[in-house]
Image (cartoon, grey):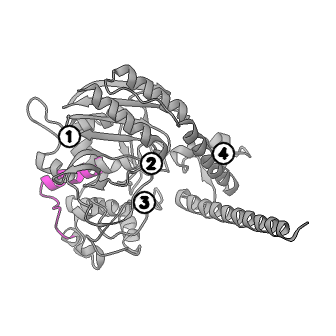
């Protein structure tokens, strides 16, 4: 064998070895990250109630030993299969038809069915309204408007509305330092404001504030969160995550003297008729079990009907009543972050989006967002088009990075349908 052939084979062998080592190392890191993040009882295994909603869909398939939980090897198998499925779904999504601008409700149904089929989702439902009135709803697979799911970061919009209601009542102020409500608070967090917390510009480090056990009190969780090293001074950079909003919720409890569940029920759920909605932990979920430190950034469990009712309540009715004042909605829907350094966004989010208060800001015009949304990692996509007064919510269970292109197309069809 010629010397250059031997060198070529040696080079290829070394390269393959490096790639294999990198993949194994990366997978091991991912297994550690997922297990640490989800293993609430710290027994080294993921029980059904600890698994994420997407993992829970496949737990029977991945539970190779049939004992009802997932060990490290089964978590690794989930990661590998998720990567392969993502590649397969992306391949299947190539060349999907362009739906006409003059769309009818049948086009919306066809597009929803196609998303469910191509991404192999358990189902999906979409409700669309205009100026406070429902105009159309479509569903596919094993989903209807009353199916309750974890909506992940779609929680942020609702949580911000709770906090803005408290601002309207004078309980909180957007630009007052946090030690106004927590006098003993010192250091970095003492000077952070509610506006910075809700716009992810508080300087918080990375993380989603989900390492708390269900039994942990909100006070204990707050003390845990403020010990996490910060990234920067408040107001300097945008870094998407859950720590800031969780700290805001604790401040709201301290200022109001009420628990978050009570605030949500009184200020949002009851007036919006969100009858099936509760806050908990985005992963750990056992119906009827109370979470003492509910996750504001990702812990809402709700249905398409409930979330649609919430969006509807943001529009004035015939008596000019609405859930939030025009000023509060305006504050939420103003671009807060485009002038800041962007250090972390989220999978599926477009590169030119900025952030308001608890929601993504698209196409700002004179600072006001033309479109707003609050997409969640598990596939939920609520949105409002302020230009046309059209709004809606897509509820499903799937990776947002895969769902997002379909969701944006569904939104386009819905807006065109109402023109």
Left or right: 286 in relation to 102? right
Sequence-earlier tag: 4 or 2: 4
- Residue on which disc 1 sits: 386
Q: Are marks 4 and 3 in contact (CB under 8 Å)?
A: no
Foreground of the two, 184 or 77: 77
Which residue in the rendered view is the most extreme toward the right? 1
In the rendered view, tell whether residue 108 sits above or below residue 92: above
Tag 3's secondary structure?
loop
In the rendered view, tell whether residue 7 sits above or below residue 290: below
Q: Quadrant of the C terminus?
A: top left
Identify the disc placed on residue 377: 2
Cα separation, mark 4 vs mark 3, equals 27 Å
The answer, for residue 329, to whether it is visible in the render is: yes
Tag 2's secondary structure?
loop
- The residue depicted at 38 percent of the width and 29 percent of the height is 145
**Which contiguous range is marked in magenta?**
158-177
- Residue on which disc 3 sits: 208
Cα separation, mark 4 vs mark 1, equals 47 Å
Cα separation, mark 2 vs mark 3, equals 12 Å
Q: Are marks 2 and 1 in contact (CB under 8 Å)?
A: no
Sequence-earlier tag: 2 or 1: 2
The answer, for residue 57, to whether it is visible in the render is: no
Sequence-earlier tag: 2 or 3: 3
């Amino acid at each position: 064998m010629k010397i250059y052939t031997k060198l070529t084979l040696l080079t290829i062998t070394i390269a393959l070895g490096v790639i294999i080592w990198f993949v194994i190392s990366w997978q091991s890191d991912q297994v550690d990250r997922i297990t640490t993040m989800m293993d609430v009882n710290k027994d080294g295994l993921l029980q059904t109630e600890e698994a994420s909603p997407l993992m829970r869909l496949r737990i029977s398939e991945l539970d190779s030993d049939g004992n009802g939980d997932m060990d490290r090897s089964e978590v690794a198998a989930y990661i590998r299969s998720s990567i392969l499925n993502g590649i397969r779904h992306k391949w299947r999504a190539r060349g999907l038809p362009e739906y006409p601008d003059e769309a009818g409700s049948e086009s919306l149904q066809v597009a929803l069915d196609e998303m469910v089929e191509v991404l192999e989702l358990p189902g999906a439902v979409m409700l669309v309204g205009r100026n406070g009135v429902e105009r159309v709803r479509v569903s596919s697979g094993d989903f209807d408007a009353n199916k309750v799911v974890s909506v992940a970061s779609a929680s942020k919009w609702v949580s911000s509305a709770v906090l803005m209601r408290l601002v309207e009542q004078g309980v909180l102020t957007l630009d007052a330092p946090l030690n106004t409500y927590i006098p003993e608070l010192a250091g970095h967090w003492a000077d952070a404001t509610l506006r910075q917390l809700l716009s992810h510009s508080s300087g918080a480090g990375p993380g989603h504030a989900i390492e708390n056990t269900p039994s942990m009190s909100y006070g204990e969780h707050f003390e845990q969160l403020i010990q996490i090293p910060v990234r920067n001074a408040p107001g300097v950079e945008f870094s998407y995550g859950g720590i800031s909003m969780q700290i805001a919720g604790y401040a709201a409890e301290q200022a109001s003297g009420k628990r978050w569940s009570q605030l949500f029920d009184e200020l949002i759920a009851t007036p919006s008729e969100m009858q099936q909605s509760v806050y908990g932990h985005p992963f750990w979920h056992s119906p009827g079990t109370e979470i003492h430190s509910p996750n504001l950034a990702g812990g809402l469990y709700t249905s398409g009907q409930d979330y649609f009712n919430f969006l509807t309540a943001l529009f004035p009715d015939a008596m000019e009543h609405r859930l939030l004042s025009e000023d509060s909605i305006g504050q939420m829907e103003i671009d807060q972050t485009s002038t800041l350094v962007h250090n972390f966004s989220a999978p599926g989010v477009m590169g030119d989006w900025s952030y308001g208060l608890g929601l993504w800001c698209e196409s700002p015009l004179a600072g006001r967002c033309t479109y707003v949304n609050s997409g969640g990692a598990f596939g939920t996509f609520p949105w409002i088009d302020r230009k046309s007064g059209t709004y809606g919510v897509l509820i499903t269970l799937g990776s947002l990075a895969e769902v997002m292109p379909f969701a944006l197309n569904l939104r386009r069809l819905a807006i065109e349908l109402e023109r």
